[in-house]
Amino acid sequence: MLDLSPPLCYTALYKPRKAKRLWENQTLWGQTDRGERQDMRTDDREDLMWQEVSTEHMIRDEWIDFRRSAYRLPDGRVFEPFYTYSRRDYVVIVASDKEENYLCVRQFRQGIKEVTTEFPAGGLERSDGKEYRTGRDDASGEDALAAAKRELLEETGYLSDEWTHLITIPSNATIADNYAHVYMAKNCRKVSGQELDETEFLNVELHGEEEIEELIRTGRFQQAVHVMGWMLAKKQ
């Protein structure tokens, strides 16, 4: 339990810079099983690492690697099960045309069983033909920017010469090991029709900034990484 004394709370509210320095010098106290106070502060990330002690690949085919694992926790206890999976890295493109309309797509998402509005996106194609990563340093996927340009063209028929990398971030660090590469593309121009995969059924829509904000506010823009991309793009 953290010791938030009145002076520290007061300082945090009214003098944030000084509060940060005070916080760094505070001792964080916890209790042992015997009720004794002990210093819980750690300056070493390795003190928080878990050790994987066993893994069962429950499903591993060309589409997904779904695992059940046991981990040794920092205090030495072994706990299971933890379920994780591997999938392809993917790209998300916050794309706008010369009139500052944003390119969005409407398609069915089986996870929530709804048709969603979102930005163009898609997986990095892999040289091994698999649909998932094979490790932390896996480099079998295509270049992320090349994938973003390809997906934008295939899904919408638009091209852009103005690309900005916004962020590369774990897709879902709790249960998955793939990454999302988020880009902004400006002054997009229509050059062709769609070239969709055999399982892709999507419609292209153009939305203004206020419309995107309203979709997000009312829960109708339902992809978390896409919302993050929107917020980052607005800061550019």
Image (cartoon, helix red, strand yellow):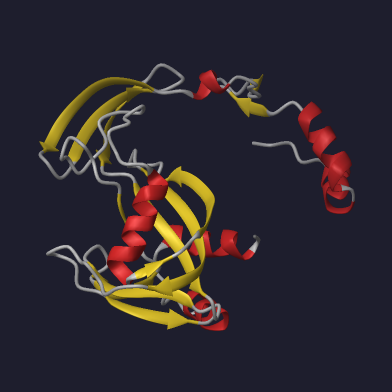
Give whichever of 184, 54 is nearer the camera: 184
* 69 vs 217: above or below: above
Rendered residue at 78%/34% (across/down): 23
Between 131 and 214, the one nearer to me in the picture: 131
Residue 121 appearing in the image: no
Residue 93 in the image: state x and y as whole percent.
43, 61
With respect to residue 25, does 231 lie above or below?
below
Q: Residue at x 52, y 19 (%)?
A: 46
Q: Quadrant of the C terminus?
A: bottom right
- For this view, does 131 lie left or right of residue 211? left
**In the image, what residue occupies the spot 36% across and 63% down?**
152
Q: Is residue 171 above or below residue 202?
A: above
Along the line of sight, the residue nearer the viewer: 229 or 19: 229
Left or right: residue 83 versus residue 160 is left
User: Front-most of 72 and 228?
Assistant: 228
- Residue at the location (21% across, 33% down)? 68
Residue 64: image quadrant is top left
Q: Residue 135: percent from the left, percent from the top?
A: 30, 28
At which x and y percent is residue 3? 74, 36
Q: In the picture provided, is 9 more to the left or to the right than 171?
A: right
Q: How many marks?
A: 0
x and y percent of residue 77 in the render? 37, 20
Q: Is residue 234 visible?
A: yes
In the rendered image, the quadrant that contains the N terminus is top right
